[in-house]
Image: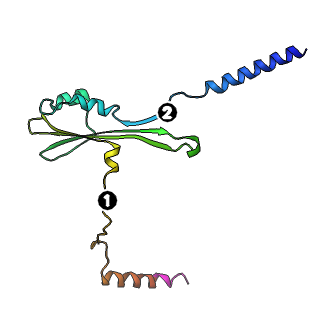
Amino acid sequence: MRVIFCKHNKLIFIILYFLLLSNCQLKATKNTHGINFLDNRSKILTVNKTNKNDVVKIIGRPHTTSGTTIDKWIYIERTLLKGKMHKLGQNILKSNNVLELTFNKYGVLTEKKLHTIEDMKKVKFTKKNTTNNVTQRSFVSNFLSSLRQKMYGNKSK
C-alpha cells in the first residue's frame, strides 16, 4: 500500500510541475510601435542613389513628413519589454530609433540620419528660464478679476 501512495505522489508532483512550466514563457514579451528592424532597413538605403519610390518599397510610408521645400521623412521604431518581477512589471524601453531621410527636389535621397537611444541620452537641455509676456496679466485685468471675486463672493453669504 505504501508503494502505491508514493507513485501517486510522484505522479501528482510531475503533473503540477508540468503545468507550472507550461505557463512560463521563454521569450520576453515585446511591445513594438512603428517599423520593426529600422536600423537594418536603413543600411539598405544608399545616399544619392535611392529615390522616394525605393524608400516606400523598402520601409513603407513615412510617419511624418515636412511641408517645406526640402522634403524630410521621419520613421520611428520603439520597443518596450516587460520588466522584472521586483520592478512590478513596469515596461522597459529597449530601443527607440528615429530615421530621418532628406530628399532633394528630384526625389533622390541626399541625407539619412539614424538617431538611437544613446544619441537621445546625450541631448543636453539648458537650465535658463524664459519669461512669457503673453500670459502675464496687466494691471487692468488684475483689478477686474479682483472686483469680480468681490462681487460674486458676497452672494454666497
> Mark 2: which amino acid?
Thr
User: Callout 2 environment at 10 Å: few (<14), some (14 to 19), or many (20+)?
Assistant: few
Q: Nearer the viewer, residue 146 or 95?
A: 95
Q: Is any part of residue 39 visible from this angle? A: yes
Query: Is residue 135 positioned above or below 105 on the image?
Result: below
Q: Quadrant of the C terminus?
A: bottom right
Q: Could you say where residue 126 lies in the image, as x and y percent from the top left?
A: 30, 63
The secondary element bearing badge 1 is classed as loop
The secondary element bearing badge 2 is classed as loop
Range shown magenta: 152-157
> What residue does disc 1 label?
125
**Of labels 2 and 1, the one closer to you:** 1
Q: Quadrant of residue 41?
A: top left
Residue at the location (31% across, 57% down)?
Answer: 124
> Mark 1: which amino acid?
Phe
Which numbered disc covers residue 114? none
> What residue does disc 2 label?
29
User: Callout 1 environment at 10 Å: few (<14), some (14 to 19), or many (20+)?
Assistant: few
Which colouring convention does the figure follow?
rainbow
In the displayed orientation, state which residue is furthest to the right.
1
Q: Could you say where residue 31 lies in the image, as x and y percent from the top left?
A: 44, 36
Q: Quadrant of the N terminus?
A: top right
Q: Nearer the viewer, residue 20 or 117?
A: 117
Q: Quadrant of residue 117?
A: top left
Cα distance between the residues tagged 2 and 1: 33 Å
Magenta span includes 155: yes
Q: Earlier in the sequence, mark 2 or mark 1?
A: 2
Magenta span includes 41: no
Q: Could you say where residue 21 lies in the image, as x and y percent from the top left?
A: 63, 25
